Image (cartoon, grey):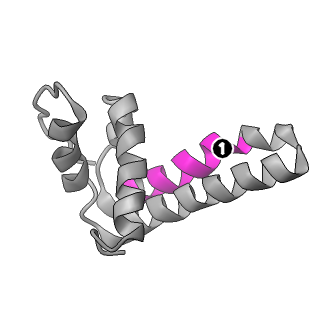
Amino acid sequence: MTTRTQPPFTNFAEFYPYYLSEHKNNTCRRLHFVGSALILILVAYTLVTAQWSLLWFLPALGYGFAWAGHFFFEHNKPATFKHPFYSLLGDWVMFRDILFGKIPF
């Protein structure tokens, strides 16, 4: 695991380039994307079926796939540990950017 010194971030626009620099590995990005897609599928399924207890699986899906990408492929610590809110937003912005081809899958 590598640890880099992080500058202080005053807004998400400053944070997002750093976030992307921590997601250079294709497999790591793909695992983030799959985890986020599964979250959307689970939320939709839960809304349709009203099986609210399934929502307990959301953290495992989201963080499980992302953290596996960081620990096994990217070899760094997830930004979630130091910047939880910006990191969560970064996950969804990166998901959108991958979905629309702005970032390679």
Residue at (32, 43) in percent of width and height: 77
Q: Where is residue 28 in the image (x, y as percent from the top left)?
A: 38, 63
Residue at (73, 54) in percent of width and height: 44
Q: Is residue 55 left or right of residue 93?
A: right
Where does the magenta region start and end? 57-70
Question: Which residue is the site of mark 1?
Answer: 58
Q: Quadrant of the C terminus?
A: bottom left
Residue at (19, 39) in percent of width and height: 13
Q: 76 above or below 95?
A: above
Magenta stretch: helix, strand or loop mostly: helix
SS category of the residue bearing label 1: helix
Q: State which quadrant residue 94 falls in.
A: bottom left
Q: 66 above or below 78?
A: below
Viewer-nearest residue: 43 or 30 = 43
Q: Position of residue 8 (x, y in %)?
A: 13, 25
How many numbered markers are drawn?
A: 1
Q: Is residue 81 left or right of residue 5?
A: right
Q: Position of residue 68 (x, y in %)?
A: 47, 56
Residue 20 in magenta?
no
Q: Where is residue 98 in the image (x, y as percent from the top left)?
A: 37, 67
Residue 64 in magenta?
yes
Crowdedness near tag 1: few (<14), some (14–19) or many (≥20) residues, C-alpha within 10 Å: some
Q: Is residue 1 left or right of residue 18?
A: right
Q: 80 above or below 16?
A: above
Mark 1: amino acid: Leu
